[in-house]
Image: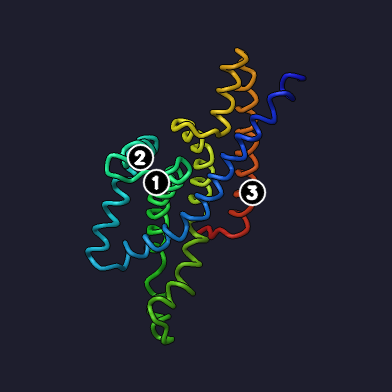
Amino acid sequence: MDYVLTILPVLLKGLQLSLTVYVMVMFLIFPLAILAAIGKVAGPQLIKKILFLYTWIWRGTPLLLQLFFIYFGLPYFGIKLSPLTSVIIAFVLNVGAYETEIIRAGIESIDKGQYEAAKALGMTYPQTMRRIIIPQTIRRVLPATCSEAILTFKDTALVAAIGMGDLLRSAKEVVTTDFKITAFFVAFAIYLMISSILVQLFTRMEKKYSIYE
């Protein structure tokens, strides 16, 4: 127990980075996903084709490979990004692609009569989307969105692959230094605890706001 208390500050510092990445990613993906989903549903053909390529590529390739390409590959084209910036871009584009498809499906599930009713009331298309369609869509896709949010936190462990000092890398460094695997067990417990908290939080959100039909 004394050893756990000794290594805990190091692991908590890594957890702070993991949570920072997670919060930043979750804050950024929803505006991207909502705009992209609307573009796929109602945008011009060129926009639809671009967004189709975006979701196809970013959903069809591993997140770790995308992270490597942004951090290690872009410098070959003269674009050098910091580790944190690379991580944020990779995660936002990857998770945003999945969330785009979730929201797109939600938008298309809304009854067409609601568009006609909004038009009859004199609403423009942007007003219809903002006031009627998007609020219903968000509530309808909340369960799938919550599941994606929980998976995203666990995926933050991938940032260790480019040398960032997240929770997993911090645990690995302690194990390498002390030749004890205790740090891995502690990191395991921390990941499980945070994931459990997120599960409880999002479960409550689902019960409060979701629409079940």
Which of the marked residues, 2 or 1, is nearer the chain's N terminus? Answer: 2
**Residue annotated with mark 3:** 201
**Apparent side of residue 154 relative to residue 116 in the rendered image (left or right):** right
**Apparent side of residue 142 relative to residue 38 in the rendered image (left or right):** right
Label 3 element class: helix
- For this orientation, the residue located farthest to the top is 179
Label placed on residue 175: none
Position of residue 115 measured from the top left corner of the image (x, y, whole percent)? 39, 76
Q: What type is the residue that disc 3 sits on?
A: Leu
Q: Are marks 1 and 3 in contact (CB under 8 Å)?
A: no
**Residue annotated with mark 2:** 66
Which colour assignment does the render follow? rainbow
User: Callout 3: 10 Å neighbours few (<14), some, many (20+)?
Assistant: few
User: Callout 2: 10 Å neighbours few (<14), some, many (20+)?
Assistant: many
**Residue annotated with mark 1:** 94
Which of the marked residues, 2 or 3, is nearer the chain's N terminus? Answer: 2
Label 1 element class: helix
Which of the marked residues, 1 or 3, is nearer the chain's N terminus? Answer: 1
Q: What type is the residue that disc 2 sits on?
A: Gln
Give the quarter of the figure containing the N terminus: top right
Position of residue 113 measured from the top left corner of the image (x, y, whole percent)? 39, 75
Mark-to-mark CA distance, 2 and 3: 29 Å
Q: What type is the residue that disc 1 sits on?
A: Asn
Mark-to-mark CA distance, 2 and 1: 8 Å
- For this orientation, the residue located farthest to the right is 2
